[in-house]
């Protein structure tokens, strides 16, 4: 089963919503610190509702701690970036993939991108991007849900 990884998430409700999606799909959630909030944050807990006991949650003190853990576990690191060129739907997911998403404000830095086995994008209509003040990216929780459900669809991981 693929695993969801959030690199230094900053907005508690986004992470809470991702946790709820992970609970609903029995997908492990890995958080790379530093976080922009406490795991006891009221907004985080509220967004995740009462599903937190169903979340297989792991935290990692830094990118290097996570990367060491991932390498011991095996599997490909799949990074999602608005600057990638390959569509997330044109990729063959594997059960041991790590689906890596960046910070809400500035995405993934160079080290995680360079460490990834693939860089994928969720396409948006160019017209929406070209407008003054256009849309730069999708919401983190929405992005995770879109990608995770595509990976599970391909892997026949949905009931």
Image (cartoon, grey):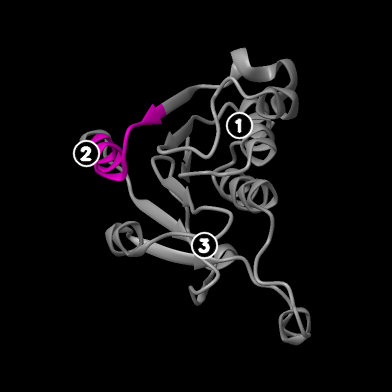
From the top left corner, tell me how far across and down residue 21 is, in percent: 67, 34
Name the N-terminal-most of marks 3 and 1: 1
Q: Marks 3 and 1, Cα distance to the nearest angstrom?
A: 23 Å
From the top left corner, tell me how far across and down residue 108 is, in percent: 44, 59
Q: Who's the residue at 70% across and 50% down the image? A: 142
Q: Who's the residue at 29% across and 59% down the image? A: 111
Up the image or down, 56 lies above or below 156; here it is above
Query: Who is closer to the viewer here, 17 or 3?
Result: 17
Query: Would you name the residue on which mark 1 appears?
Result: 22
Which dot marks residue 68? 2
- Residue neighbourhood size for the residue with mark 2, other residues' Cα within 10 Å, grouped as few (<14), some (14–19), many (≥20): few
Up the image or down, 35 lies above or below 51; here it is below
Q: Are marks 2 and 3 in contact (CB under 8 Å)?
A: no
114 falls in the magenta region: no
Q: Nearer the viewer, mark 3 or mark 1?
A: 3
Secondary-structure class at tag 1:
helix
Name the N-terminal-most of marks 1 and 2: 1
Query: Would you name the residue on which mark 3 appears?
Result: 106
Secondary-structure class at tag 2:
helix
Secondary-structure class at tag 3:
loop
- Quarter of the picture containing the C terminus is top right
Q: Is residue 70 left or right of residue 33?
A: left
From the top left corner, tell me how far across and down residue 54 is, in percent: 61, 16
- Magenta stretch in the rendered image: 59-71
Q: How many marks?
A: 3
Q: Marks 2 and 3, Cα distance to the nearest angstrom?
A: 24 Å
């Amino acid at each position: 089963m693929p695993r969801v990884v959030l690199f230094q998430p900053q907005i508690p409700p986004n992470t809470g919503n991702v946790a709820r999606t992970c609970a609903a799909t029995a997908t492990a959630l890995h958080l790379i610190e530093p976080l922009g909030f406490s795991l006891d944050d009221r907004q985080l807990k509220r967004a995740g509702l009462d599903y937190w006991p169903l979340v297989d949650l792991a935290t990692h003190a830094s990118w290097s701690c996570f990367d060491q853990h991932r390498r011991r576990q095996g599997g490909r690191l799949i990074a999602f970036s608005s600057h990638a060129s390959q569509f997330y739907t044109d990729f063959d997911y594997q059960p041991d993939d790590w689906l890596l998403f960046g910070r809400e404000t500035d995405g993934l830095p160079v080290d995680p991108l360079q460490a990834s086995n693939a860089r994928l994008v969720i396409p948006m209509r160019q017209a929406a991007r070209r407008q003054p003040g256009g849309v730069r990216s999708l919401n983190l929780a929405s992005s995770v849900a879109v990608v995770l459900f595509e990976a599970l669809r391909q892997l026949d991981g949905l009931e």
